[in-house]
Amino acid sequence: MKKTIIIALLMMFGIVSQIKAVGVNSMQDENGQGQVSLPVEVDENGNAVMTQEQNQVKNERENTQIQTQEENTIQTRYDSVDKARMNEFNSKLSEQRRSKVANTVQSMLQIADQDGGVGQQLKAIAQNQNQNQLKLEQNVEKIQIRGGFTKFFVGPDYGKIKDTQKILEQNKEQIRQLNQIRTQLSNQGDQQQLTEQINILEQVNQEIEILLADAQEGFSLFGWFNKLIS
């Protein structure tokens, strides 16, 4: 009887020692789904010691975090580069439009000097077109530089858009006057030349109208309110 009790105690002691030596540690797998049970070893003082499997999981997690940080950094750099390229592209287009209008104004002034009848009226419109184009490009630049974060909350710069639309309406009215002046020119060559300049002015105005339409696209949380008060 005593031998049986002693044997039973020894068996129980062996099971407890085995449980103490090797435990079970539950942790998520690398995809964050489910649970992965890994053995936990303890040293002679009872302190947990990470197993090879646990070290591998830890290293994989650290590598994933580092890779995610690097990807975010790269994406931020790409966004900055794309924004810089877009600003440069918009700046070149603006410069091209200003150049077109400046050349058109010079041509109209030459025609005005050659025709005494409608020359003064043509000169006044030409000078006004030059001033209007400068205002248009300044407004367009401010409209385009509005960041995506601000645009998402309050929408585009409706104040500048409204002011730009008013200037475009002035341009259209002056283009109608230019068509009337064209029919009053005595020189057929001047008529043809003024027709070409009118077409250029119309093309420039259409480009800006497209830019305004693009700027107003997209969703914004409080854009409707901003548009209302503008």
Image (spheres, grey):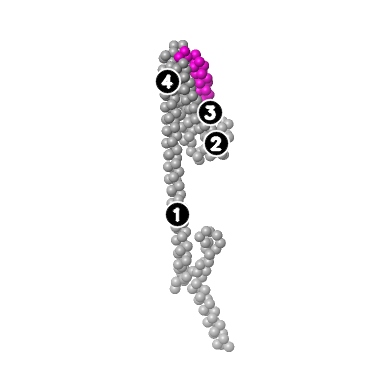
Q: Position of residue 55 (x, y in %)?
A: 45, 64
Give the farthest residue toward the front. Answer: 188
Give the main secondary structure of the magenta stretch.
helix
Sooner in the amino-acid sequence: mark 4 or mark 1:
1
First in sequence: mark 4 vs mark 3: 4
Q: Earlier in the sequence, mark 3 or mark 1?
A: 1
Q: Nearer the viewer, residue 120 or 22?
A: 120
The label shown at residue 107 is 4
Nearer the camera: disc 2 or disc 3: 2
- Give the foreground label among 4 and 1: 4
Does label 2 or label 1 sit earlier along the sequence? 1
How far from the left and from the top, in percent, is residue 78? Answer: 44, 45
Mark found first going from the N terminus, 2 or 3: 3
Of mark 2 and mark 4, the one earlier in the sequence is 4
Q: Which residues are magenta?
A: 161-187
Say few, some or many: other residues with alpha carbon within 10 Å of mark 2 (under 14 / 14 to 19 / 20 or more). Answer: few
Quadrant location of the C terminus in the rendered image: top right
Q: Is residue 57 above or below residue 140?
A: below
Q: Amino acid at mark 1?
A: Gln
How far apart in space, not on screen, are marks 2 and 4 (Cα)?
A: 37 Å
> At 47% across and 29% down in the image, what residue appears?
139
- Which residue is label 1 attached to? 67
Disc 4 to disc 1: CB gap under 8 Å: no
Calculate the distance from the C-alpha at mark 3 to the C-alpha at mark 1.
Answer: 46 Å
* Amino acid type, residue under disc 4 in the picture: Ser
Verify CB contact (< 8 Å) between mark 4 and mark 3: no
> Per the image, is 45 magenta?
no
The kind of residue on which mark 2 rests is: Glu
Report if the CB atoms under discs 2 and 1 are less than 8 Å apart.
no
Q: Secondary structure at mark 3?
A: helix
